[in-house]
Image (cartoon, coloured by chain):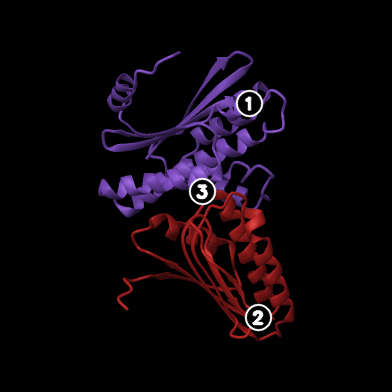
Chain colours: A red, B purple
Amino acid sequence: MDKLVIEATRSSPALEFDAETCRLSIKGESYPENAAAFYTPVFAWLKEFLADLASGAAVQVDLEILYLNSSSTKVMLNFLDLLEHAAQSGVLVTINWRYDPDNEAILECGQDFSEELKTVMFNLVEQTEDLS
Amino acid sequence: MKDFDLVRLRDDLSKRGILMVFSGPFSHCIVEEFGNAVRHYLENARLSRAAMMDVFAVYVEQAQNVGNYLRRWESEPHGARIINSGIVIIARDDEHYVISSGNLLAPQDVGPLTAQLEQLRTLDKMGLKALHKEKLRQPLTEWGSGGLGLIQMARKATAPLQYTLTAVDEWVFFTLRVVI
């Protein structure tokens, strides 16, 4: 399965989904004009990827979101729900919600999502200054 | 030819604490560019990152609400007046930032919107969180997040959302004011 790579724009995040390493990452801001349209190829890729996974496979999802508008919040929950379903059928899903401690809204958003999920491992990870 | 007294207009904006204003057709490009300008302005004003992102988030929801509503009228024969009626303002009021927006509404759209706003005005932080949780699971509509944006604004606001309605010919001019 081909990698899914989408470059960031001012109002949409960078995505890098790699089926080989089972690592998915979304990084940046999301307030596109049409959130449903922007994420359609992302959902198509994710559904195909999850359908091919064996029970017991491990998937790591890194989410480093700086801003989500209300439409993107709904889409993100749908995205997390797909991962939750996979986890319920035996895939080991780890989601790292990476937040800047100065950006309280994103921490709160991560907390809202964590309340909606039961089976995935959902970690709120404080990002310290990247000095590299 | 009509002349504009820009000196007086600028002075009036300044006296009212208005820092930035956009009025005209709301394209997505404008939402991005004006939003970027708002962030630069607030960064230069040494606002904390948390407060800056709250102002920015409320601005995006308001600008996208206005833009999404006005776009509905693009194919309507008498839509031109409504399409160009949008305005968004960022203002300073003592210790607070105020984000306001306005646009013309068709009379039949006033009731459902004010019902939502009246409900939000009665809720405290816990009530807003519970309503947010409920609406989060409702599907996206063709025109946006189906009221989730208003709840998110109310959760960030330091005072209940305020709105006004003013009759303008066969339309209603709606304004929303959010204090951060």
Q: Residue B117 location in percent, x, y?
A: 54, 32
Chain letter for the residue marked with disc 2 in the picture: A
Residue at 50%, 44% (x, y): give it: B31
> Gap in Å between the C-alphas at discs 1 and 2?
53 Å
Do discs 3 and 2 share a chain? no
In-image side of A89 versus B132 (left or right): right
Corner quadrant of residue A75: bottom right
Chain letter for the residue marked with disc 3 in the picture: B
Residue at 59%, 60% (x, y): give it: A76
Amino acid residing under circle 1: Ala
Do discs 3 and 1 share a chain? yes
Labels 3 & 2 near each other (Cβ < 8 A): no
Which quarter of the figure is the C terminus of chain A placed in? bottom left
Numbered label attached to residue B80: 1
Q: Residue B44 location in percent, x, y?
A: 27, 48
The residue to which callout 3 is attached is B129
> Gap in Å between the C-alphas at discs 3 and 1?
38 Å
Corner quadrant of residue B159: top left
